[in-house]
Amino acid sequence: MILKPEAVCAQDQTPSDDEVNQIASQLYCPVCENIPLDECTTQVCKDWRDLIRQRLAEGWSQEEIKFDFVKQYGERVLGEPPKQGLHWMLFVIPPMVIFAGSILLWNKLHKTKAKPIASMDDYLQRVEQDLEALKEK
Amino acid sequence: MSVNQPSEHSQSAKAYKLWVILIFLGMIALFGILGARLLIDGDEPVVIGSKAPDFVLTDFSGPTIDTSKLRGKTVLINFWASWCAPCEDEAEMLEETWRTYRDDGTEAVLFIGVAYMDIETASQAFLSEFDVTYPNGPDLQGKISDLYKVTSVPETYLVDPEGILRNVKKGPFSSVEEILTFIEMTQIGN
């Protein structure tokens, strides 16, 4: 018996659990909060994983599947907020705060290190004056 | 030996203060934006006696239903899902109750089903299984359930002919009589 090549391909195209879970891990079930789709054991999440498997089998890309989930269920299903609108602030502000804080800290430490102690200033000035006086002698 | 000049000190102190002010202003702006967004989104539950949020639902069969155009009728809004076991028991009772209103010819009471976080094919299979004939559609992006602050299914809301929320049921109905009593609240409210 000779198998047709397309029959073999169709069998190979069945997405594995790992392939499904790779996408499911990036999505969250809005019904059971804070549980990624790949870990959730409820019926709704099982249905959603089946839908991902079906979409993958139909040739949908990861991004297309995620986009379809957002279209159907909203941005709440995304594990990571999309980099658009106000969500940009979540990506921009923390590094900015860390950068600004580092500058402030560096500035503070640098100032503390460089700032001469008043009594030492006077003492050094006197030493310099004495040395100059010695040189002149 | 070099000693820091007073002008350098004052310059770095000014720069330091400037940074502190900028960060402080940045934080105020950030909290302001987040606060404004929270106010816009609102997190207040829908209260009985207040105006019920209007929405547009696209029926699984195609046409859209705009609840703002249903004034003059009592509207029962049921949130359900195919994966919700209690919704199965309730579906038959809701359909039976709906048929009594549908067949009386007055069209005084309308039923609307909103499929909450469901897969469309599963929703349609559920509707076929329980022979549900009143309008039903998906809650796209959870916008309708967000308006009603739905936290679980089934949940049912009753809106009177003036668009005022008159009754809320969280959880499944246990009998047709209970649904009829639930709907009679519009008469009591008025």
Image (cartoon, coloured by chain):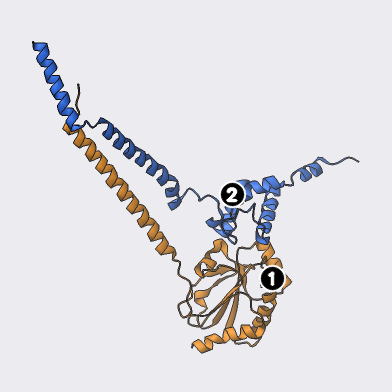
Q: Which color was chain B given? A: orange
Residue B85: image quadrant is: bottom right
Amino acid identity at mark 2:
Gln
Instruction: Give the percent coordinates (x, y) of residue B103.
Output: 66, 85
Image check: B120 left or right of B166? right
- The chain carrying label 1 is B
Instruction: Give the percent coordinates (x, y) of residue B116.
Output: 60, 66
Q: Nearer the viewer, residue B168 or B62?
A: B168
Residue lying at the far left of the rendered structure: A137
* B158 up-or-down from B114: above or below: below
Pointer 1 with pointer 2, Cβ within 8 A: no
Image check: B188 left or right of A56? left
* B120 up-or-down from A137: above or below: below
* B41 up-or-down from A98: above or below: below
Label 2, residues with CA under 10 Å away: few <14, some 14-19, many ≥20? some
Residue A134 shows in the view: yes
User: Residue B127, which numbered label?
Assistant: 1
Q: Which color was chain A given? A: blue
Residue B119: image quadrant is: bottom right
Residue B99 shows in the view: no
Instruction: Check disc 2 and report the residue beneath it.
Output: A26
- The chain carrying label 2 is A
Helix, strand or loop status at disc 1:
helix
Residue at image point 51% right, 68% down: B149
Residue lying at the far right of the rendered structure: A1
Helix, strand or loop status at disc 2:
loop
Quadrant holding the C terminus of chain A: top left
Q: CA distance from mark 1 to mark 2?
A: 30 Å
Instruction: Give the percent coordinates (x, y) of residue A57.
Output: 71, 48
Residue at image point 64% right, 81% down: B98
Instruction: Give the percent coordinates (x, y) of residue A121.
Output: 17, 28
